[in-house]
Amino acid sequence: MSIIEAIWQREPMPGKLASLRHGNCRKSEAEIAKAPSEQWPQWITGSVLSRSHLYKVLQEKIELQDKEIEKLLREQI
């Protein structure tokens, strides 16, 4: 998720993106760093950004619902 966040913030440096890779990532940091991010098709970056935004919105809604459930449970117990 860190790499997606960096893309969301328009991080231009592939080396910075590579340093954020998750330990389970199949590609090495060196392989990610040499990938030409400026050549990514616009539809890919747009798709990643729109989906990450949707993920954030849904996470916020889930957190709010969790708090409401906790509140209701405290009232019942």
Image (cartoon, rainbow, N blue to C red):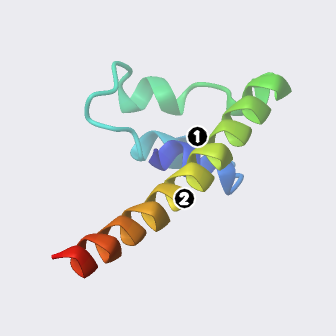
Q: Which residue is mark 1?
A: 14
User: Is 70 above or below relative to 47?
Assistant: below
Residue 77 falls in image quadrant:
bottom left
Q: Residue 72: where, in percent of width, then height? A: 33, 72
Amino acid identity at mark 1? Pro
First in sequence: mark 2 vs mark 1: 1
Residue 35 visible here: yes
Name the residue located 48 percent from the left edge and 67 percent from the top edge.
64
Q: Residue furthest right?
A: 42
Q: Amino acid at mark 2?
A: Lys
Residue 56 x, y percent position in the rendering: 57, 53
- The mark found on residue 37 in the picture is none
Can you tell which of label 2 and label 1 is closer to the viewer?
2
Q: Which residue corresponds to mark 2? A: 61
Instruction: From the viewer's side, name the closer residue of 59 and 11.
Output: 59
Marks 2/1: CA–CA distance: 32 Å
Q: Is residue 74 above or below residue 11?
A: below
Circle 2 Cα neighbour tier, 10 Å, few/some/many (<14 / 14–19 / ≥20): few
Residue located 34% across and 26% down the image: 25
